[in-house]
Image (cartoon, rainbow, N blue to C red):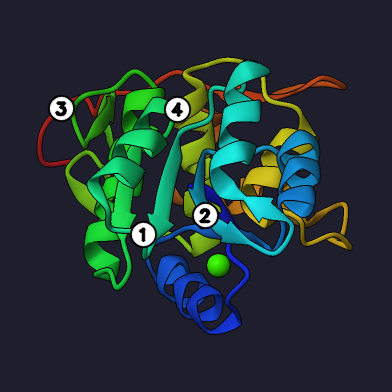
Amino acid sequence: MHVLLIEDDDLVASGLEAGLELHHCTVDRVRTSREARGALAQFGCDVVILDLGLPDGDGMDLLSSWRQQGVATPVLILTARDAVQDRVRGLKAGADDYVLKPFELDELAARLNALVRRAAGRAAPEVHHGELTVRPDAGQVLLRGEPVSLSRREFALLEKLINGRGALLTEDQLKDGLYGMDSGVESNALNVHIYHLRRKLYRDVVVTERGLGYRLGPPPEPLTGAGS
Ligand code: CA
């Protein structure tokens, strides 16, 4: 999942970035409301982690303005402000969750996954595509019951396709999900990940719509016959 982290404290931010990458996330980090507006508009993301005390304003105001503009991306407020009235204000401003610092990374990651899952219209933590099973929380993929080892980027690519549920995704949308704001990605890097995903799973897992983009293909063919 692609996370936009809005946090001005470098120590908190670097800890979060490292921790969330271990939880199979692509993390873009910004320090101010202004940077956050630009990043969300340009790159998008699956979920936002929002600190409230930002150098150029209150995160609550940023959230309110996003919601007024119709931005529906799930937002988790991560703050030291523990007063009940702050929590209520945050949720009323359009936050989807409110977590206090200090926090447990595992719990935070689980909450982020739950938000993304709900935003994608799923209640169950597992996604089944025929005999392909994806467990975003655990970063696991099973093909016909057998675990398949994917790199972080391959997993991010598969997750993006699965969450798209067959919708056409442009090359830029996929790259944003895999690399976030890391520009300077070589143009064939995405192709390399697609190649590996097809090789490790099955050829039609990614369908190329020439000149348009990519989408999730049909589920894997069931194996016929036993003992072969
Ligand atoms: Ca702060």
Asked whether residue 135 appears in the rendered view, the answer is: no
Residue 76, percent across and down? 41, 45
- Residue extending furthest left? 226
Is the Cβ of the residue at disc 4 closer than 8 Å to that at disc 2?
Answer: no
Q: Nearer the viewer, residue 102 or 110?
A: 102
Which residue is denoted by mark 4 in the rendering? 94
N-terminal-most mark, 4 or 2: 2
Q: Nearer the viewer, residue 59 or 219?
A: 59
Give the amino acid type for the residue marked by disc 1 in the picture. Arg
- Helix, strand or loop at mark 2: loop
**Mark 3 or 1: the one toward you:** 1
- Helix, strand or loop at mark 3: loop
N-terminal-most mark, 4 or 1: 1
N-terminal-most mark, 3 or 1: 1
Is the Cβ of the residue at disc 1 closer than 8 Å to that at disc 2?
Answer: yes
Give the amino acid type for the residue marked by disc 2 in the picture. Leu
Give me the residue at 68% from left, 25% from top.
169
Q: CA distance from mark 2 to mark 3?
A: 58 Å
Residue 70, percent across and down? 62, 15
When asked about the image quadrant of residue 139, the answer is bottom left
Which residue is denoted by mark 1 in the rendering? 81
Give me the residue at 62% from left, 18% from top.
68
Which corner quadrant holds the C terminus? top left
Q: CA distance from mark 4 to mark 2?
A: 13 Å
Give the amino acid type for the residue marked by disc 3 in the picture. Gly
Which residue is denoted by mark 3 in the rendering? 225
Which residue is denoted by mark 2 in the rendering? 52
N-terminal-most mark, 4 or 3: 4
When asked about the image quadrant of residue 99, the answer is bottom left
When asked about the image quadrant of residue 87, the answer is top left
N-terminal-most mark, 2 or 3: 2
